[in-house]
Amino acid sequence: MNKPLKSDQRKVQTFPIPFPVEKISETISINSKEEIINKAISLHLNGNILDAEKYYSYFCEQGFSDPRVFCNYGTILMKSGALKESELYTRMAIKLK
């Protein structure tokens, strides 16, 4: 049987979770399809996943298509838990390739 909790035992404890608080201050001012791809892939390769995701997303919003971008963006989405979107971009990459 569970014992009733005392009033001081009912308090919720919170713990801070460290996460980067830096915001992406750079606005995307690149217009060329290849420049966007190169910047996104470079960021991705250097481990700057949040900025790479921003560029991949921007690339897709511009209506461009490239299997490398769709595959990489799909992988990032999968790792962030966005499985339906991940599947969509991965399938688009496979279809193009």
Image (cartoon, grey):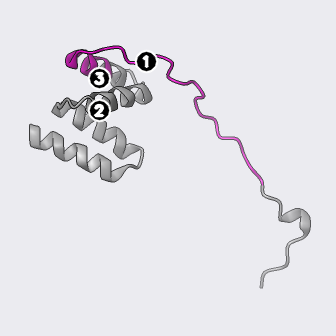
Q: CA distance from mark 2 to mark 3?
A: 17 Å
Closer to the camera in the image, 27 or 53: 27
Residue displayed at 21% across by 20% down: 33
Q: Which structural element holds mark 3?
A: helix
Q: CA distance from mark 2 to mark 1?
A: 15 Å
Q: Farthest residue toward the right? A: 7
Which of the two labelled residues, at mark 2 and mark 3, occupies the earlier sequence position?
3
Q: Which mark is residue 27?
A: 1
Q: Which structural element holds mark 2?
A: helix
Quadrant (top left/top right/bottom left/bottom right) for the C terminus? top left
Residue 28 image offset from top left, x and y in percent: 38, 18
| Kind of residue at disc 2 | Glu
Q: Which residues are magenta?
A: 13-40
| Kind of residue at disc 3 | Ile
Whether 86 is drawn above or below 26: the answer is below
Q: Is residue 55 left or right of residue 23?
A: left
Q: Say whether residue 26 is magenta.
A: yes
Residue displayed at 31% across by 48% down: 85
Looking at the rendered image, the disc whose residue lies closer to the viewer, 2 or 3, is 2
| Kind of residue at disc 1 | Thr
Residue 37 image offset from top left, x and y in percent: 25, 22
Give the residue pinned by disc 3.
41
